[in-house]
Image (cartoon, rainbow, N blue to C red):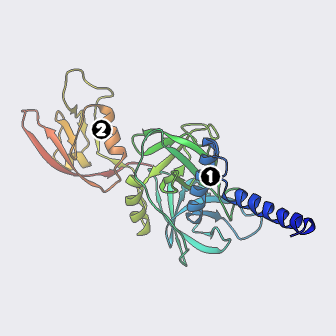
Amino acid sequence: MNRNQFLPLSCIVLSVILCARFVTAKPPPLSETQALEIQIKKAVVKASSCTIAILDNQSIEARVRSGTLVGPNFVVTDSSNLVGFPNSVWIKDSQGKLYKGKVVGRDWRLRLAGITLEKPVPFQLVKTRKEQTGLFAIACGRGEAPTGLPQATVGVISALSRFSGRTVQVSCDLNQSMAGGPVVDLEGQVYGVSILLPHQISRDSGVGFMVTWRILEKSIEIMKSGKNVYPASFGLLVPDRDVPGLTGIPVVEARPGGAAANAGIEKGDLLMAVGDRPLESIYDLSTRIAQLAAGDVVKIKIKKSGGAEKVVTLTTDRRDK
């Protein structure tokens, strides 16, 4: 092999070696921030199909709000998204396809509304009940992204029991256009549906709230049947504050014809437990009632003025919304 033949051959060999090293070389490790950003994007992609847009009409100028697809034919949203109590709305999925929807029920406890769809929508929804303070929370919405990937804001679960145990608090920025969309974890699993509580806390404050599956699933079944869900009442009066040294909540008055009176509860009785959960404070009682809906049947443990304890069955009244 002469010199003129060797040089081109050696160049080819060197190029092959360099290419092989480039292909087999490990990429630089990702920083924690980069890895987290990739995981968040994957979670948003996973939640995309169940994050849908709600439109009041089909025009380009239509107002866009968010909803969560909880079944192929059923959407849950923040009821404040349905201004004027419309009977029907339009739904747009992540691919931009339009569906006609009918508003069939509202949950006045949770500020939610249910919408049935004329045709099923392809979607993926994985539920999670791993609610724990400090876990990442990603709020997804369609206000500025009617199709494709939804807009998303990231925070953490910051409190587990807010507003009498009906909601979970998250540190995600939420505005009107995002409310009603799903809140997911880093795996894209859905914690629940976001809502706004404007009368309790200012909007765009970095604090948001969601209704989780623990309460949401029962509400969905009632709304699917075409009924509304109303707040519950026991039809009784108790002291404004706890009575020191007293075990149980004293009944100041059981309204005639009310739920408590119909269950056999009287003035002077002590409320000891609701269901299998003991009552240790007035707050405990208000929390238990807030988590119930009108018409729910619950067991109440009471202590009569003579000291005898008994369990009565109470069917809750409807409290004015």
Q: Position of residue 295 (x, y in %)?
A: 31, 57
Residue 67 sits above or below residue 205 on the image? below
Q: Position of residue 30 (x, y in %)?
A: 63, 46
Q: Is residue 89 visible?
A: yes
Quadrant position of residue 182:
bottom right
Q: Earlier in the sequence, mark 1 or mark 2?
A: 1
Residue 12 sits above or below residue 253 on the image? below
Residue at 13%, 46% in the rendered image? 311
Residue 121 sits above or below residue 146 on the image? below
Which label number is shown at residue 284?
none
Residue at 62%, 52% in the rendered image? 38
Q: CA distance from mark 1 to mark 2?
A: 44 Å
Which label number is shown at residue 38?
1
Which label number is shown at residue 285?
2
The quadrant of the image that shows the N terminus is bottom right
- Residue 15 falls left or right of residue 302: right
Q: Amino acid at mark 1?
A: Ile
**Mark 2 residue crowding within 10 angstroms, few (<14) / some (14–19) / many (20+):** many
Residue at 48%, 57% in the rendered image? 189
Q: Amino acid at mark 2?
A: Leu
Q: Nearer the viewer, residue 227 or 184?
A: 184
Q: Position of residue 181 (x, y in %)?
A: 57, 56
For the view shown, which residue lies furthest in the right direction?
4
Q: Position of residue 16 (x, y in %)?
A: 76, 64
